[in-house]
Image (tube, rainbow, N blue to C red):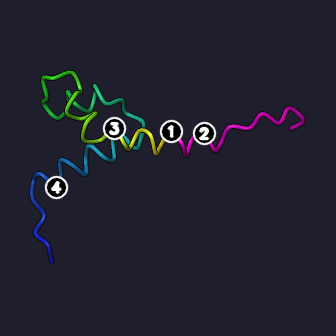
Amino acid sequence: MKQITHHDLRHLFATICIESGVDIPTVSRWLGHKDGGALCMKTYGHLRQDHSLAQAQRVSFDMSA
């Protein structure tokens, strides 16, 4: 079984926050980064795209409902 490190827990925390809708600059500050979110965007930016595509599936332009 793989040993879980503090880095793994930080990554899990950031992933859950971003997937829950917390914006990347806020998560970046919570993690103690001073780069305005650049590193988080590079590392976790794909999560926003996946979440965005999933949310787009919820949009309906059916006006009869």
- Residue 40 placed where, x, y %? 24, 35
Alpha carbon distance from label 1 to label 4: 24 Å
Residue that numbered label 2 is attached to: 56
Alpha carbon distance from label 4 to label 3: 17 Å
User: Residue at 60% across / 39% down in the picture?
Assistant: 56
Number of residues whose C-alpha sits closer than 10 Å to that of mark 1, classed few (under 14), some (14–19) or many (20 or more): few
N-terminal label among 1 and 4: 4
Residue that numbered label 4 is attached to: 8
**Residues rendered magenta in the picture:** 53-65
Q: Which label number is shown at residue 52?
A: 1
N-terminal label among 3 and 2: 3
**In the image, is residue 56 part of the stretch drawn in magenta?**
yes
Amino acid under label 1?
Ser
Q: Observer-nearest residue: 45 or 55? A: 45
Tag nearer the camera, 1 or 4: 1
Secondary structure under tag 1 reads helix
